[in-house]
Image (tube, grey):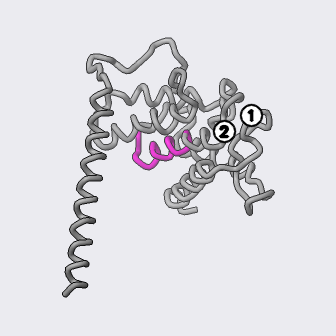
């Protein structure tokens, strides 16, 4: 009987702890949300900037998957086409001269993870059947394949059993190591391309 009582008391304490923890997390969330001032009249656009790239302090990757890719997700799940032109303009403006998301304006900061986020955005565009670019412009699937091809060529067997370095260019901080997000982006694109193309 004592063992049963002890077991019940432990379960009750654990439940109380979980409830207190849940409450603490909810209060912290509400404090953070309450601290954010949402301007519902803001158009969210800053004309005159570089299409596809968010202003400082944001990095290249934020424009890729987190911004333009999010607009594609928004269109897909809501059917609202309001932001399609902005997403298309951003995705096409940053393709670079080789249509592989290595634009000259990012050589001082672009890493494999950054390029990978752009590749995932256009992979979503292909999978969701996002409106195609005009004829003569690079198409979504071809852009995702170009990201894969450039990254596969940079696969480095030295250290860690292989992988992509964090940075693409040797003059950038972080070129000397491999990071998880670069590998994750690459494998995400690889798996999705294999599924989409059957190759």
Locate the N terminus and report the quarter of the image it occupies: bottom left
Q: Position of residue 60 (x, y in %)?
A: 58, 31
Q: Residue furthest front?
A: 2
Instruction: Tell me the quarter of the picture where residue 119 sits.
Output: top right
Q: Position of residue 177 (x, y in %)?
A: 73, 47
Percent coordinates x, y for residue 89 in the rendering: 48, 26
Q: Quadrant of the C terminus?
A: bottom right
Q: Which mark is residue 111?
A: 2
- Would you call the spot at circle 1 few (<14 residues within 10 Å), some (14-19), or many (20 or more)? some
Q: Please state the extent of the stretch shown in magenta in the rendering.
A: 118-130
Looking at the image, residue 148 lies above or below residue 72: below
Q: Nearer the viewer, residue 29 or 166?
A: 29
Q: Are marks 2 and 1 in contact (CB under 8 Å)?
A: yes
Give the residue pinned by disc 1: 172
- Disc on the earlier residue, 2 or 1: 2
Task: Describe the element under mark 1 as helix, strand or loop.
Answer: loop
Q: Residue at x 58, y 41 (%)?
A: 143
In the image, is residue 82 above or below residue 163?
Answer: above
Element type at marker 2? loop
């Amino acid at each position: 009987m004592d063992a049963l009582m002890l077991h019940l008391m432990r379960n009750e304490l654990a439940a109380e702890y979980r409830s207190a923890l849940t409450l603490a997390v909810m209060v912290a969330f509400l404090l953070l949300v309450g601290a954010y001032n949402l301007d519902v009249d803001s158009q969210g656009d800053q004309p005159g900037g570089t299409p596809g790239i968010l202003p400082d302090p944001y990095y290249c990757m934020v424009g890729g998957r987190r911004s333009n890719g999010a607009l594609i997700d928004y269109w897909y799940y809501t059917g609202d086409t309001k932001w399609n032109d902005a997403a298309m303009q951003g995705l096409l403006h940053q393709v670079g001269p080789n249509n592989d998301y290595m634009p000259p304006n990012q050589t001082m900061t672009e890493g494999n993870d950054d390029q990978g986020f752009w590749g995932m955005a256009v992979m979503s565009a292909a999978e969701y059947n996002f409106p195609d670019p005009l004829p003569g412009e690079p198409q979504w699937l071809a852009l995702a394949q170009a990201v894969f091809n450039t990254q596969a060529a940079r696969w480095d067997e030295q250290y860690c059993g292989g992988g992509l370095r964090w940075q693409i260019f040797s003059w950038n901080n972080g070129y000397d190591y491999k990071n998880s997000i670069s590998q994750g982006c690459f494998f995400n694109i690889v798996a999705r391309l294999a599924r989409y193309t059957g190759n």
